[in-house]
Image (cartoon, rainbow, N blue to C red):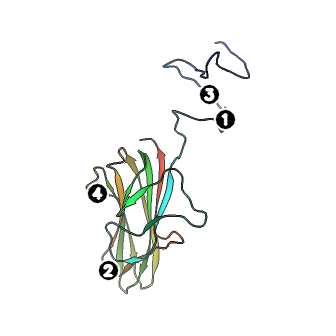
Amino acid sequence: MSKIEVDTIEPQSGTTVTLGASGDTVALASGTTLNVSSATLSGITQGITEAQQWRLTTDFTGDAIPIASNWEIVDTNGQGYLGTGMTQSSGVFTFPSTGLWFVQFTVSYNQSGGTDTLLESNISVTTNNSSFTDQCRCFTELGASGENQSVDTSTIIDVTDTSNVKVRFNVSSNASSNTVRGGSGNNQTFVTFIRLGDT
């Protein structure tokens, strides 16, 4: 095996340097640092490129399948997002790009009545832009009037087609007295979207 020691490799002509040929493996030794902080990458997944949260802006009482209104992108107290971001219509969220997406649904409940209440929150997904299936379900119980509780559930969605794979968020209970908390100044009931990588 030969060894070449140089400080800089530049193309003989043009602007492209090719390492290896088709089918070859170019290996970096253990402990090597690849510094690409000022480079433009192509053909390489550059880590997380999408991250965003949406929140419910007002309280409501009773069931909602789905929560169809009063959603906003978080926008206060230094909050922001990465990438293109989600879009939403009547509570149905559309992904900006294909890939494997982490989705989390956090709900803040208040028991405004006086009876035991079993509460359910779920993330519902369609793969044909029509029929929705609960991909995960979370249950909690409030036993006393005025009691508050926050719960969350999460899943990873394989978004193979942004026109057909969409998500919505539902809440229901065995009584009509539960209140789902919302607010425009902070996250109370909210959803988190993070693109993890390619599908």
Q: Is there any visible trace of residue 86 in the rendered image? A: yes
Q: Residues within 10 Å of mark 2 (few under 14, many from 20)?
A: some
Q: Earlier in the sequence, mark 1 or mark 4?
A: 1
Badge number at residue 28: 3
Residue in front for this viewpoint, 116 or 154:
154
- Label 3, label 1: how far apart the Cα atoms are: 12 Å
The disc labelled 2 sits on which kind of residue? Ser
Q: Residue at x 45, y 41 (%)?
A: 198
The disc labelled 4 sits on which kind of residue? Phe
Q: Helix, strand or loop at disc 4?
A: strand
Where residue 66 sits, quadrant-wise, is bottom left
Badge number at residue 35: 1
The disc labelled 3 sits on which kind of residue? Leu
The disc labelled 1 sits on which kind of residue? Asn
- Label 4, label 3: how far apart the Cα atoms are: 46 Å
Q: Helix, strand or loop at disc 2?
A: loop
Mark 3 vs mark 2: in front: 2
Disc 3, disc 1: CB below 8 Å? Answer: no
Q: Earlier in the sequence, mark 3 or mark 1?
A: 3
Query: In x, y percent, where is residue 125?
Result: 33, 55
Badge number at residue 132: 4
Disc 4, disc 3: CB below 8 Å? Answer: no
Where residue 147 sits, quadrant-wise, is bottom left
Instruction: Find disc 2 in the rendering and name its residue.
Output: 176
